Image (cartoon, rainbow, N blue to C red):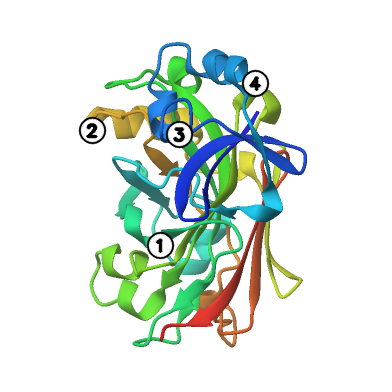
Amino acid sequence: MKLASFTRSGRRSWGVVDGDAIADLGTAGPATLKLALSRPDAIAAIRAATSGAPRIALADVTLDPVLPDPDKILCVGLNYENHRKETGRDVVEHPTIFTRFANSQIGHNAPLIRPKCSTHLDFEGELALVIGKPGRHIAKDTAFDHIAGYACYNDGSVRDWQRHTIQFTPGKNFMDTGAFGPYLVTPDEVGPLPDLKLQTRLNGQVVQDTRIGDMIFDIPTIIAYCSTFTQLEIGDVIVTGTPGGVGAKRNPPLWMKPGDIVEIEIDKVGLLKNPIVDEV
């Protein structure tokens, strides 16, 4: 299934994408996708509710971030070898984890905003996962049991603010810089991850191109690590890292600017597209 959160006529809801329409499940059932995932046998319950739900044309809705209201968003830095090398960072034994705030997120087709204080807005195409089963001290061999689905993510980064100190947080949390969507695709539709291609395009030019299997720390390792220091809750988002090719490490640097279109595409997961605009 493909699940989406959306707004129509000022009302927020969620549902199952069915071709060019979406089955609206937020009117008669749980009000948000996170609440729906919190029910026992959530995926089976969502499937059962879909057949009788009213359909709305996708063209008539605004897609919101897949999970607008996660308890937390955990991001993995430097998780592809070609990105680690282009940044000159040392090899490390553990994943590099930082956080993004929920109110910094946008959905598919929404404008990604270059802030007034900087022109150094960079792209980072990534695979995101959403937790569907809570847990602490999750073992690697059961980690996939805790995943509700996958989505594309653009961890838009304001590089000069990211480099103010050794902490990433400011540069990763400007408003309307974290694009998340268009849909949450359930694991049964995605299948094995390693051979899936992740590609970022800026104005049609390929700027990042990798396989998910090229991660330094794989998804079970990331889930096991994160669940050791925090309780992973239903609806939590883990953004698993970006490959090499970021704009900051090009010569000359390639920054996103107003009028640009950035696309993140992952095989079997989807295509996330956002225009770039200036903050007003």
The C terminus, quarter of image: bottom left
Frontmost residue, 135 versus 229: 135
For residue 89, the mark is 1
Give the residue displayed 42% in from the left and 67% down from the top.
Answer: 176
Disc 2 marks a residue whose amino acid type is: Thr
Give the residue displayed 67% in from the left and 20% down from the top.
Answer: 51
User: Which label's residue is closer to the chain start, 4 or 2?
Assistant: 4
Q: Is residue 71 left or right of residue 181?
A: left
Please name the residue that numbered disc 2 is placed on: 230
Query: Can residue 198 be spotted in the picture?
Result: no
Q: Is residue 176 left or right of residue 154?
A: left
User: Which label's residue is closer to the chain start, 1 or 4?
Assistant: 4
Q: In the figure, 150 relative to 44: above or below?
A: below
- Under tag 4, what secondary structure? loop
The N terminus, quarter of image: top right
Say few, some or many: other residues with alpha carbon within 10 Å of mark 4 (under 14 / 14 to 19 / 20 or more).
Answer: few
- Can you tell which quarter of the image residue 222 is in? top left
Say few, some or many: other residues with alpha carbon within 10 Å of mark 2 (under 14 / 14 to 19 / 20 or more).
Answer: few
Disc 3 marks a residue whose amino acid type is: Leu
Q: Position of residue 224 (x, y in %)?
A: 36, 27
Frontmost residue, 122 versus 87: 122
For residue 52, the mark is 4
Disc 4 marks a residue whose amino acid type is: Gly
Please name the residue that numbered disc 3 is placed on: 33
Q: Position of residue 238 (x, y in %)?
A: 42, 41
User: Which label's residue is closer to the chain start, 3 or 4?
Assistant: 3
Disc 1 marks a residue whose amino acid type is: Arg
